[in-house]
Image (spheres, rainbow, N blue to C red):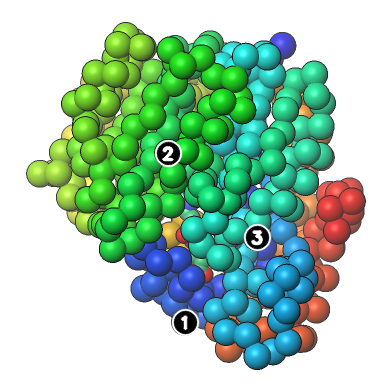
Amino acid sequence: MNITEINFDGIIGPSHNYAGLSLGNLASAIHAGDAAYPRAAALQGLAKMRHNLALGLAQGFLVPLPRPNPVFLAAIGADGSENPRLTAAAWSASAMWTANAATVSPAADTGDGRCHLTGANLVTMPHRSQEWPDTVRQLRLAFADQRHFAVHDAVPPCFGDEGAANHMRMSTSHAAPGLEIFVYGTSGGAFPARQHVEASRAVARLHGLDPARTLFVEQNPAAIAAGAFHNDVVAVANERVLFTHELAFADPAGTYAAIRERLPEAEIVVVPTADVSLADAIQSYLFNAQLLTLPGGAMALVIPTEAWEHGRVRAWLDRMLAGNGPIRRVLPVDVRQSMANGGGPACLRLRVVADPATIDPRFLLDGAKAARIEAVIAEHWPESINPGEVGSTELAERVTAARIALLRALDLTELA
Ligand code: SUG
């Protein structure tokens, strides 16, 4: 077995638009009503995937879900009299943020030695709550080999679950048994706490995780209040390294101690508030980065250009690179169209540690397939979408046909 980390990025769908649907996600609120550029957005996403491929890393993808979603529109009895926010919900391309597609526990961590994936119900936001049935359908296709994978339906909707965005895994190497850290929020603040502890505990049980190697950690309510609607906006982990803002967790010292007790090799890189405030972190999306192990063994941080261009963040990164820490390279990528809806490099990918040979090859990327996808995007994705166009019959036909063209190009028409 060639156990490796594979990043599955969401291909940004042709209906990408800015409808301001996510309370507590500051970028989504700020950009509500802006014109969106779906073609540029999707090409930015592909460029990021190519960037990872060029680093010598395994790369996969998930395809956009049907939008406007006929199932959602039927379920709300849509007849044109519904609230325009519900129309926008049915059109949302939010499945691009595959960090919210599922929670993944690699085979080395689970009771039955298979890699487990549980679809995230995303119930806190109406526009995201419709994603999971189609997402799970797609995961069951990509990870169909039941000798190696188990794909679970989402946990009951009484417990909000946002998937891998609130889950971190630390280990001495990707293939080794890991410490799984579930980060949950508590409600009561101005913004919703989207991840409920009971959802995290249910996922851990479904995956058969060893309680001795599982932690449930509370997110700092101040981080949620400042706009960190997911933990991956203030912390990211890879192998033995945790890269975190000082104010990410309700009890930082207790959290670090619990991690070190279970993984003595852990290296915790804490960015202090004095250098980078919570507001700076959320505005720049410094932590919504891909912390990657390069083929040579060194770690690289793939950050959004917004973080690289942010004065205080850049100063901190320059100091970090000049020091002797575990993160040796910082690589900025341009995903501005996604960023304007609160989705940075880490939101756009779902990490799966597995042998690529056990996965349906139709979901794995190489240069030739990237070129094929780019050609479909260039031909079929709308150049721009203004908020007023959301709901139009003509545009609905266009974005539906665009998605079908992609599925044909990828030989994935069973997802139509
Ligand atoms: O759920 N934005 C997404 C961004 C998700 C980011 N994911 C991670 N942090 N892993 C969300 O808030 C905006 C859609 C709109 O406003 O139209 C949106 O859904």
Judge depth for marks 1 and 3 and give the one in front. Answer: 3
Q: Image point 36% across, 23% down: which residue?
A: 241
- The reply to whether residue 343 is in sight is yes
Disc number placed over residue 7 in the picture, else none = none
As measured in the structure, the alpha-carbon distance from the residue carrying label 3 to the one carrying label 2 is 21 Å
Q: Image point 39% across, 62% down: which residue?
A: 25
Secondary structure category for the residue under label 3: loop
- The three-letter amino acid code for the residue at tag 2 is Val
Q: Image point 67% across, 84% down: which residue?
A: 391
With 51 as the anchor, is 3 left or right in this view? right
Judge depth for marks 3 and 2 and give the one in front. Answer: 2
* Nearer-N-terminus badge (2/1): 1
Image spot of residue 245 (x, y percent)? 25, 39
Q: Mark 3 highlights which residue?
A: 130
Asked if the beta carbon under badge 3 is closer than 8 A to the nearest atom of ligand 1, the reply is no
Q: Mark 1 highlights which residue?
A: 33
Is disc 3 surrounded by few (<14), some (14 to 19) or many (20+) residues within 10 Å?
many
- The three-letter amino acid code for the residue at tag 1 is Gly
Image spot of residue 125 (x, y percent)? 51, 62
As measured in the structure, the alpha-carbon distance from the residue carrying label 2 to the one carrying label 1 is 34 Å
Disc number placed over residue 197 in the picture, else none = 2
As measured in the structure, the alpha-carbon distance from the residue carrying label 1 to the one carrying label 3 is 22 Å
- Quarter of the image with the N terminus is top right
With 78 as the anchor, is 99 left or right in this view? left
Image spot of residue 364 (x, y percent)? 74, 37
> Above or below — where is 34 with respect to 210?
below
* Nearer-N-terminus badge (1/3): 1
Secondary structure category for the residue under label 2: helix
Q: Are discs 3 and 2 less than 8 Å apart at CB?
A: no
Asked if the beta carbon under badge 1 is closer than 8 A to the nearest atom of ligand 1, the reply is no
